[in-house]
Structure formats: structure tokens, C-alpha cells
Amino acid sequence: MRMPFPYEEFDLSGVRTYPLASRASTTRIEDFGRPVERGASFKAWFDSLPAILGAKDLRRVVQAVVDARARDGGIIWGLGAHVIKTGVSPVLIDLMRRGFVSAVALNGAGIIHDFEIALSGATSEDVDESLGPGRFGMAEETGALLNDAIRRGAERGQGLGQSVAAFLADRNPPHADRSLAVTAHRLGIPMTVHVAVGTDIIHMHHAASGAAIGETSLRDFRFFTSCVARLRGGVYLNCGSAVVLPEVFLKAVALARNQGIALDGLITVNLDFLPMYRPHTNVVTRPVAGTGGTGISLVGHHEVLIPLLAAAVVEASGT
């Protein structure tokens, strides 16, 4: 039987050291943040941020978006529903009008929230309050009108996003100016919607057509893939979607590569308030591996980071 190790202190007398000045350090005072004076401009404040970690990554994203617009590299925004629920649609609409959005992708809940905002100026019901009495997801207009728009779009050979955007733009609802879909339609920006059947409240309504939802969402996947295939030197931002849009994006990248389309220099960005496996893997790392591209992760609340990113982009571009 082997004997156990004895209590014996490790001898440190021969440990080798080196001069501090000779070491390559990752944090240096020239990268430190600076205090700003009261009443300083946004540019002065943004320029005062440390060139370290999250602040450094934010600067990189700002520059990537500005550069992509300057060279027509394309900028696609993938938006989860929570982004719309946190009230940043007007900020994104402003970016659309300034030319910083080449295409928009939503999940199924995203188009529902955008639709309700356009129609009534309010969205996001209290699930805890409405689930017990059986009222959750049963708003009449949301179920009836959205399903009708999707069915009509399928008949016309449109995608789901295209169908709803055209439907809303034609009706010109009271709050159309706050709608991403209406703005996309009026500016000619492709909007696609990517649905997992059974996940959205409109699927609970009798007017829902699986054939129409599936057909229009599949068509949107092909539209989206066509947009992704144009992203060489461009930027893809996944904001607030933990599963559906990262999966859709990875499949679009796979199809583009299958057809020999190079996406060299692609910058991918995931922006969310929690680091998640699938966005990190399918957006930040896999699509840019071995291509000379870059994946960046920004962690923070949508209602803070997206307006901050947008303001910095506008300031840096001089638009």
C-alpha cells in the first residue's frame, strides 16, 4: 500500500521573478476612464469611457456599424420580443431612417408586440393575472387580425413579416409611427418573422392557419438567408433572442457557405442582459470562426444598451 504524502511546506527559495516594467500588462492607465464635467456632451461622456472590457467592446460595435454603413456591408438586426417591450422601437426606427438597418428579423412574439403597439399604443399583458381566469392571449383583434394578415399574405406569396407590415401600413393605425413593421414597409427594408408553431398567443385562436403560418415563415427564412448572404464585411446584431433567431441565423450562414458565398469580415454581436449558450455559440463564435470575422458579446439591459449604442453610432457617423 502506498504511503500518504507527508505535511511538508513547498520550498519557495528558488522561485524566479522578473522586473514589473518588463511585463506585458492588459490594463494600463492610458485606457482608464475619465471623469466628465457637469453638462458635458454625449460625445465627451462616451469618449471618457475606459477602453477596457465591456466599454471597449461597445466601441468596437459602434465602429463596426459605422464602417458597415460606409461601405454598404449590410447591417441586420435580429430582435427578440423583449426588445420591443422595453420601449426602444423609436430608437431603432430612427436608425432605420438614418440607414443603419439593412434588414430586420423578429421572432413570432416580436411581431405580435409590434402589431399591438401600432394598433393600440400598448402591449404585454399581465400573464400572472390573466392566466388563471383563462384570458391569457385572448385579445380579439390580435388573434383575428394578425391571423387574417398572415393568411392573406400566404395567398399572395409573401413572407410573414411582409404580410403583417403591408397589412398595418395599409390600415395606418393610430400609432403607426412607433411600429417597426410599418417603418420597414415604408422604407423598403425587408422584415422577416421566424415562428415556432405553438409558442405565440395567436396560435391559440381559431383563425390560426398552420399552413399559412408555416408557409409564410418558411418563406421568410429564405428571404432572411438571402439578406445574410450579402453580409460580407457587414454586421449582424442579435438582440434579446435566446433560441429562435440564433438558430435561424446559423442555418442561414450554413446555406450561404454551402453555395460558396464568402462572409469574410463579418462582425456578429449578441446583446442581452444575460450570457446564454446558444447566442454565444451560434452568433458570436461559430459563424466567424476561421473567416477573419469577429464576434462580440455585450451584456446589459436592452432599454439602456440599445439607445446607448444608437446614440454613439449617430455621433460617430456624423449623420
Image (tube, grey):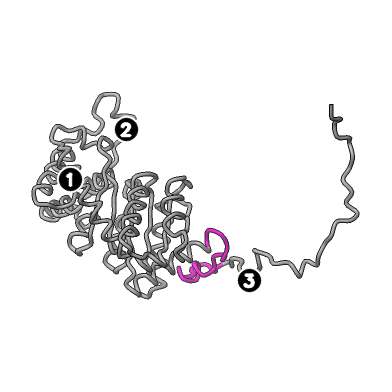
Q: Quadrant of the C terminus?
A: bottom left
Q: Nearer the viewer, mark 2 or mark 1?
A: 1
Q: Residue furthest top?
A: 133
**Residue in front for this viewpoint, 179 or 102:** 102
Rendered view: 50 above or below 160? below
Helix, strand or loop status at disc 3? helix
Q: Residues within 10 Å of mark 1 (few under 14, many from 20)?
A: many
Return the disc, 3 or 1, that comes first in the chain's sequence.
3
What residue sits right under mark 1 in the picture?
A: 215
What residue sits right under mark 2 in the picture?
A: 127
Q: Which residues are magenta?
A: 36-55
Gap between marks 3 and 1, in whole Å?
55 Å
What residue sits right under mark 3 in the picture?
A: 30
Helix, strand or loop status at disc 1? helix
Return the disc, 2 or 1, that comes first in the chain's sequence.
2
317 sits left or right of 164 in the view: right
Mark yes or no: residue 153 visible: yes
Q: Nearer the viewer, mark 2 or mark 3?
A: 3
Return the disc, 2 or 3, that comes first in the chain's sequence.
3
Rendered view: 15 above or below 99? above
Q: In the picture, residue 8 is in which quadrant?
A: top right
Q: Residue at image x 89%, y 42%?
A: 9
Q: Nearer the viewer, mark 3 or mark 1?
A: 1
- Residue type at mark 2 is Val
Gap between marks 2 and 1, in whole Å?
29 Å
Q: Residue at image x 30%, y 65%?
A: 230
Q: Position of residue 2 (x, y in %)?
A: 84, 30
Q: Residues within 10 Å of mark 3 (few under 14, many from 20)?
A: few
**Residue in front for this viewpoint, 185 or 114:** 185
2 sits left or right of 243 in the view: right
